[in-house]
Image (cartoon, coloured by chain):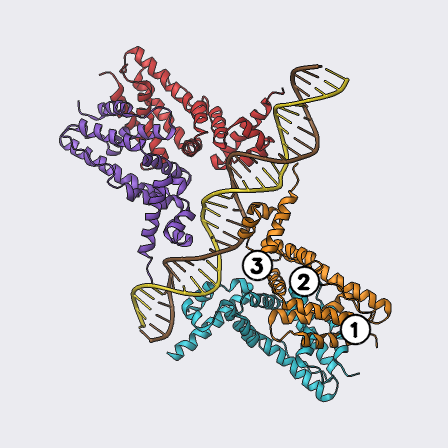
Chain colours: A cyan, B orange, C purple, D red, E yellow, F brown
Amino acid sequence: MRPQSVRARESVLTATCALLAEGGLPAATVDAISARSGVSKATIYKHWPSRTAVAAEAFGIRMAGAVPLPDTGSAVGDFTEQVRLVSEFYASPAGGTFAQLLAACVTDPAGAPYFREFFLTGRREAVAVLWRRAVERGEVREEVDVDTATDLLFGPLVFRLVSGHAPLGLGEAESIAEAALRGLLVR
Amino acid sequence: MRPQSVRARESVLTATCALLAEGGLPAATVDAISARSGVSKATIYKHWPSRTAVAAEAFGIRMAGAVPLPDTGSAVGDFTEQVRLVSEFYASPAGGTFAQLLAACVTDPAGAPYFREFFLTGRREAVAVLWRRAVERGEVREEVDVDTATDLLFGPLVFRLVSGHAPLGLGEAESIAEAALRGLLVR
Amino acid sequence: MRPQSVRARESVLTATCALLAEGGLPAATVDAISARSGVSKATIYKHWPSRTAVAAEAFGIRMAGAVPLPDTGSAVGDFTEQVRLVSEFYASPAGGTFAQLLAACVTDPAGAPYFREFFLTGRREAVAVLWRRAVERGEVREEVDVDTATDLLFGPLVFRLVSGHAPLGLGEAESIAEAALRGLLVR
Amino acid sequence: MRPQSVRARESVLTATCALLAEGGLPAATVDAISARSGVSKATIYKHWPSRTAVAAEAFGIRMAGAVPLPDTGSAVGDFTEQVRLVSEFYASPAGGTFAQLLAACVTDPAGAPYFREFFLTGRREAVAVLWRRAVERGEVREEVDVDTATDLLFGPLVFRLVSGHAPLGLGEAESIAEAALRGLLVR
DNA sequence: ATATAACCGAGACGGTACGTCCAGTCTTAAA
DNA sequence: TTTAAGACTGGACGTACCGTCTCGGTTATAT
């Protein structure tokens, strides 16, 4: 009974990862996931509230640890490097899937918590580690909220990724990091 | 040759505005737009490449001038006020539609240019006005790109709006504005 | 595994019969069938390859036994009566639907087998019964193929029904039957 | 005032012939005819009541004289040969177009007179010539109506062509001709 | 020669149906 | 009783073609 259930979850997530890698979110239809995983649609809907939720969880698992935590010795170095890495991630195929998932969460409120729990939280926690380290070193303004700091650094990148109103290369990422950091560092 | 009917365009845009106001993007199906506007689907698809494009144009037209340009006399005042206004807009029903449209553009590449042209560009241009004014006054760092500045101020809001990972009230908006401005102002 | 629903098939066929009776083939659109039967279009297209196929099957079922087999005691009487009955059928509203279906099968190859299986075969089998009876009695030329005999008797009627190049009343039907029978009877 | 352009009529018919030859009736859409002929749709609809009418006229013109009148010296020979020729025509691509046109006339009452006038009448008149010749020779029953005779000979072929319920090769054509003629010849 | 219809090309338009797709729910049979 | 298999509803999608309509430009006849 219970092991059955675990196996089903895992098959679904594995299959979904593969489908996401092959064709992004559009390829991860529930029918495709069901067919590839050998798990029936009914069962999928017993474990997850919606397709977006499945995809978000699968994506989160797959991307865990995809961006290593930099440790350059300084807050400026760490955050600049992190922004650079994230902007590279956004430019990759997986970055496209990230955008699709983010978009899907707007439409599908049931999937959003999964995306936050399995993907966003992990990424943000990594940034929080850098932030706490920098606070301890006295390099950044401790009165600034971690969430504020994180969004200041990465919100601009996400905005560009999603709307495409401006390019998002390394140069742009650095400019953004520079300005954001100036707002976060202790003078 | 008979020119494309202005009446058709306008009927469509008017009907779409109404539908967006009533039920957001999900309500603005092509069939509904066609039915309400009296313009056939075929004609709609001759004028626009996709439903997203129609909705984006209609939304852009409707929102033109929705957020008035602040003029407080100082860069800090102007930008803080602008961030406040925008965060209020995001919290309104129209803000939800904005998020839906942004999300739709990820899925529908054909609609994205319309969203940028008819909505984003206008909003960003308004911020650019504030920015140029502040540069002239010598209040902000003129070496910072307008796009960078704009995204630093509003990207964090958009990110929160779309993913909902953190609240987006006036307090949060102010914190973000404060940190962003610190990165943009001349010392 | 869940089998295809018998209820769905039957609802569709019943609804289609009603629509055919009300407005002929043009009234039996897939949307109308779906609406009236409560069966979704997707399901209809899983059961039948095309609208023509649905209509043909429904029509065949409805018309089964519509023309009773004559039994006058002689081949001449039987076939003459049968031709008369068929020509009356052709003149009725159902005859119009028959012509529409026949025409639709030219355009829609997928529907043709349905029309043959559910309508034509039954009608022709009825004639074959008369033919075999007549052969046993030694009244007709047994070297003539049943199909040839059937088409000789009814092909002329169908041709007139479809193209309308000549009237098709009882008088004409009798003339045709007379000439055809002269070609089929033993001297 | 200004007369209707002969050039337009002819361009349309020429273009339609070409389209019919290339892809049968489905290829002869009004848009395609308009594009290929350089005659506008409005003009086409001023000259003909419907697409079927155009196609029928074009087809009739193209097929005029396609089947030469046999003259074997005897009624049996003439009619047998004629049935053979017609069955060969039905098996050709043009035969398919004939069936499509016949079918279209069921749906489109406005086109039917055109098909009769420009195609059927010509073909039937050819048969009538053979029939009158045979009557003069005293070979066939003069009390039989020409239309009846014609339909007895060709109705079976048309029925098979349209519904495909039985094959229609030379052998079948001969069997049909034999039986039909037996009903028409003087004993 | 010029005016003035009617004609014409180009193609936009409304309308209608098509067949497809996918999400999410429901049903059956087997394990 | 849980599961796999997949049938089903519902609703939107984008396409195709028909026949009508609207332009601006052209052309044959009537003054």
Please give the chain letter of the residue carrying mark 2.
A
Q: Quadrant of residue B109?
A: bottom right
Residue located at (38% from left, 24% from top): C165
**What residue sits right under mark 3 in the picture?**
B22
Amino acid beneath label 1: Val
Residue D155, by quadrant, is: top left
- Judge whether residue D85 can be spotted in this image: yes
Locate residue A67, reporting x and y percent: 63, 76
Are discs 3 and 2 located on one and the same chain? no
For residue C167, above or below residue A79? above
Q: Which residue is mark 2?
A: A164
Q: Nearer the viewer, mark 1 or mark 3?
A: 3
Whether tag 1 and tag 3 are in contact, CB under 8 A, the answer is: no
Q: Position of residue B58 (x, y in %)?
A: 64, 54
Pick the quarter of the image with the C terminus of chain B. bottom right
Q: Position of residue D68 (x, y in %)?
A: 42, 20
Instruction: Say if mark 1 contacts mark 2, CB within 8 Å.
Output: no
Residue B76, disc: 1
Which label lies toward us, 1 or 2? 1
> Is residue C143 visible to us here?
no
